[in-house]
Image (spheres, rainbow, N blue to C red):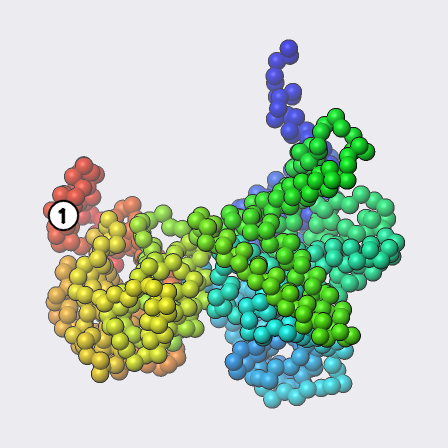
Amino acid sequence: MPATNSKNGAWAKRWRAAFLVLQRNRLVVLALCCLSAVWWADVPSISGAFVFIVSVVLAASIFRWRFVFFVALAILCATMHHRRVVRESNLHEALLQKSSVEGVFHIQTPPRKSSQTWSAFAFVDGKKFEVQGRNPAPSMGTALYGKGFVEPWRKPRNEGEFDHPNWLRRNGVVATIRLQQVVEDPSQTHKLLQWLDGMRLKLRHSITSGLAPESNEAKVILAMVIGEQPGQDDEILSAFRLSGTLHLFSVSGQHVNLVAIILWLVLRILRVPRRYAIGLLIPSIFLYAYVTGASPPAIRAAWMATVFLAAFWFQRKPNLLAALSIVMLFALFLDSHLIFLAGVQLSYGVVAAISIGLSLCNHRIQRWSLMDDYLPRELYTSWQERWVSFKRGTAQSLAASSSACLGSAPLSILHFGMITPISVLANLLMTPFVGMILGLALLSVTLNPILPSAVMVINRLNGLVARICIGISEVCADIPGAHRQYSFNQPPHDTIRIFDLPRGGAATMLQLKNADLLLDTGSIRDKKTLIASLAYFGCSPDCFLLSHAEAGHVGSAENLLSKLPVQQIISPVAESRAASFRRLVSAANSRQVPLLLAQPTVLSLSDQVKCRFIPTPGCSDKRLIADDRVCLHLLDFHGFTILFAHDASPSDLRDLWPTFSPPIDVLVLGRHELFSWPIDSWPVNPPRVVIASHADFPSSERLPVAWSQQLESQGIHVLSQNDTGMVSIHVNQQSELCLRGFLAKEWKLSRRLHDWIFYASLLYAELRLRMPNLRETLWDFSKYEGC
């Protein structure tokens, strides 16, 4: 028996097999080279350079001298992308200086409506803008003549917050225009877009006729057929999100493929020849993709289906990876920004994972589905043939669902901070019913002009199928371990993050070793910021600590209750005149979440973090305003003292100051409704650092510059959140309190000398086993540098 070496071992055989696969899929290597080059050109980084170099080396080892062509094409893609980014950036700066734009605005997308305003993408002189206006909203394809003012893009001020300006840039938008005094110009209306918009409205009416407009069944049908999603606060989204099936609520590759399969089956039943069927199928797929809004995943799926079906037209063997690579290469040349969108990345990544997974499992599936290895297929009975087909279809569906789950998991964690293993089962169970919903919807559209009464019956039947989908999602979401909050950005140590919210809103995230908490929840406008940031850090608060019943501090608590695993709420008051607080109490009662009254006591949050509740004297007086009924929170954070004063009045804070022990290291300060000038003097032991909130509107929330200068002259360092944005606090390995602003630098705070003496006996009693290292830290005062 010959000895095993590097040339005839198992790994060598696997490498040769992979080598042959890549040789047969040259377009995949080419697409990888171009993709990594564009990534490197967009954000120059070590990781991008590493991926590009690896892809080039891979191409050189497989294709020899032809890799030069691959590198040249990759450099061309990167150069085009870089020029596109520079051109759009220069155009954006020029428009900001110009401050206004006048011309004809051609509305290209269905407007997104709110209570009083609307927004849509529009073209003016070949440039793409986001336009905003007041209701009534125009239809897609409308031409509006008038003037608009350029709105500056608001950059994120909190880590993990959704970057709306970056999303606009990735969609090719050069600026946001707020329209003023516009009139419709019928002579320049885009007839094709208006026809598509009219088709979408007719399709919407046809598939919901006979159903209650606000019913959950109608919402599911509209979302799955035309991609019209319910509102972000709609509770129906929760079950689909937690079961990993929320992608069914947007028209993507799965919907386009199911529509293509349904139309293909109809054409085969009508005995239409294959070539003619393909000729009818391709335009139908593009029509469906554009009528439903022309989302990037839907357009990708339509082009991919075209390439895939073209193989049948030219009598060639179709290849899913080759079709995906061709579509990706065209996307890189036409609009390279698209590959940085989360939806497009998930779309391409899932298709690639399914293709690779099916190719790896195909041989095993074929062998497993056979009745007998030695029984020819020609001798199978009709029932045996059906059984084999059922086993093969089930195994392929399970392999595709598992591959999609594994392929989408890294991107789901990266973009949404969640992983849903139950999605393998949920998608497998729900896909047939989604096909039924699409098939019944197409039947309704076909019969609507001639049999309106039959359409209502079909839609009610479709509503029952939608109810089954809702039930599957709810059952799967309730299975233990079905979903888990996870993030690549979870901190390895206890961390406090103080949000920078507009208009006087306040919220603080506490990620501790044993628990996650949310100290205040901001206003109703801040819910998207909080949800995005919590998911970014993998934080799942199970407790709300409320400072006072004011809309800027508890406004979004009601909405967050439906999205977070909250077990209790601790509030300084049980009753309040604030409508937002009354809605929170009602929501907590309906969800059986206990609302506890804050008492002057100490709550142990983790081994080294304790919270002391300090209600102000006016908490029990219902006649006072909300800012006079505040509960202060004093945190003992790894030996440092952090006081959250919230919106307490300067007089209340000054009266309570002598009771704080040990002395305050960091004071987190809000703004009282009636006192624009915060506290500026302390009876004893002033704080070392003050973190003060700031908002340009209303004017009462602005931080006085003279006040900051006065504190700085007293040796107190002031961190205005107007300059820092979100502030993160943690203790490093050198026992220093690190304060880092999202928009600014990092500050380090060493312990006070008397703090060490105060904690010496407690630390000695609790950490006696670590005394050698502790003694080195306790008596090393050379590091003390103040702020």
Residue 329 visible in rendering: no
Q: Quadrant of the N terminus?
A: top right
Q: Nearer the viewer, residue 620 or 675?
A: 620
Question: Crowding at label 1, few (<14), some or many (≥20) Cα neighbours within 10 Å?
Answer: few
Q: Which residue is mark 1?
A: 762
Q: Position of residue 714 (x, y in %)?
A: 20, 68
Q: Toward which corner of the image does residue 215 lie, by quadrant? A: bottom right
Instruction: Please state if 46 lies on the left or on the right of 32 as rendered.
Output: left
Looking at numbered disc 1 in the image, what kind of residue is underneath it?
Leu
Instruction: Please state if 698 lies on the left or on the right of 599 as rendered.
Output: right
Q: Position of residue 240 (x, y in %)?
A: 53, 59
Q: Position of residue 574 (x, y in %)?
A: 25, 72
Q: Quadrant of the C terminus?
A: bottom left
Tally the numbered discs: 1
Residue located 61% across and 61% down the image:
465
Instruction: Please state if 46 lies on the left or on the right of 111 as rendered.
Output: left
Instruction: Please state if 550 lies on the left or on the right of 191 as rendered.
Output: left
Q: Mark 1: which secondary structure?
A: helix
Q: Nearer the viewer, residue 702 or 219?
A: 219
Residue 429 visible in rendering: yes
Residue located 26% across and 51% down the image:
606
Q: Nearer the viewer, residue 535 or 781?
A: 535
Is 638 rendered above or below residue 376? below
Residue located 69% across and 80% down the image:
142
Direction top: furthest residue: 1
Is 164 rendered above or below residue 482? below
Q: Nearer the viewer, residue 680 or 167?
A: 167
Q: Toward which corner of the image does residue 317 lie, by quadrant? A: top right
Q: Position of residue 113 (x, y in %)?
A: 57, 77
